Image (spheres, helix red, strand yellow):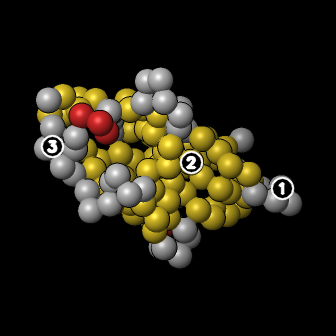
């Protein structure tokens, strides 16, 4: 069984910073891309940032220059450093991993439970 557990969300004032973490655990054979998505109330879930196993990154235009995604492959953990936060960044942030579980022939996408980020004015 595979789990993704996020941490690091909370309440912060506009202009502040937060760092999210997501650790994958369980019967994992390999992890390909990892990423962060977010969903604000009344809106669809959207991509925030992704990172491949080799370290290539991709960001939504709305967070470029403010957010940084990174990963520690030895710890099966992905991070999202969020700086210069804005009220419009308020959302539930979800971790995602494209990984192959032990005993499986293919990869599947797994999701964390989500962590709330609230940015006040």
Q: Are marks 1 and 3 in contact (CB under 8 Å)?
A: no
Local secondary structure at mark 3: loop
Which residue: 29% across, 36% down?
A: 88
Alpha carbon separation for disc pair 3 and 2: 24 Å
Q: Position of residue 18 (x, y in %)?
A: 25, 44
Query: How busy is the neighbourhood of tag 2: few (under 14 within 10 Å), some, or many (20 plus)?
Result: many
* Left or right, 9 with reference to 40: left
Q: Nearer the viewer, mark 1 or mark 3?
A: 3
Local secondary structure at mark 2: strand
Q: Quadrant of residue 20?
A: top left
Q: Position of residue 43 (x, y in %)?
A: 48, 30
Alpha carbon separation for disc pair 1 and 2: 20 Å
Q: Tell me which label, 3 or 2, sits earlier in the chain.
A: 3
Residue of label 1: 103
Considering depth in this image, is 61 or 22 the residue closer to the camera? 61
| Numbered disc total | 3
Residue of label 3: 16
Residue of label 2: 96
Q: Tell me which label, 1 or 3, sits earlier in the chain.
A: 3
Q: Quick check: can you spot residue 23?
A: no
Local secondary structure at mark 1: loop
Q: Position of residue 39 (x, y in %)?
A: 47, 34
Instruction: Indicate whether 88 appears above or below 49.
Output: above
């Amino acid at each position: 069984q595979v789990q993704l557990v996020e941490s690091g969300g909370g309440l912060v004032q506009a202009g502040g910073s937060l760092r999210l973490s997501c650790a994958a655990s369980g019967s994992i054979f390999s992890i390909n891309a990892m990423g962060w998505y977010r969903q604000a109330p009344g809106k669809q879930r959207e991509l925030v940032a992704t990172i491949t196993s080799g370290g290539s990154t991709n960001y939504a235009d709305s967070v470029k220059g403010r957010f940084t995604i990174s990963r520690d492959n030895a710890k099966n953990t992905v991070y999202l450093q969020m700086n210069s936060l804005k009220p419009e960044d308020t959302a539930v942030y979800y971790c995602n991993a494209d990984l192959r579980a032990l005993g499986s022939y293919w990869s599947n996408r797994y999701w964390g439970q989500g962590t709330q980020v609230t940015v006040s004015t």
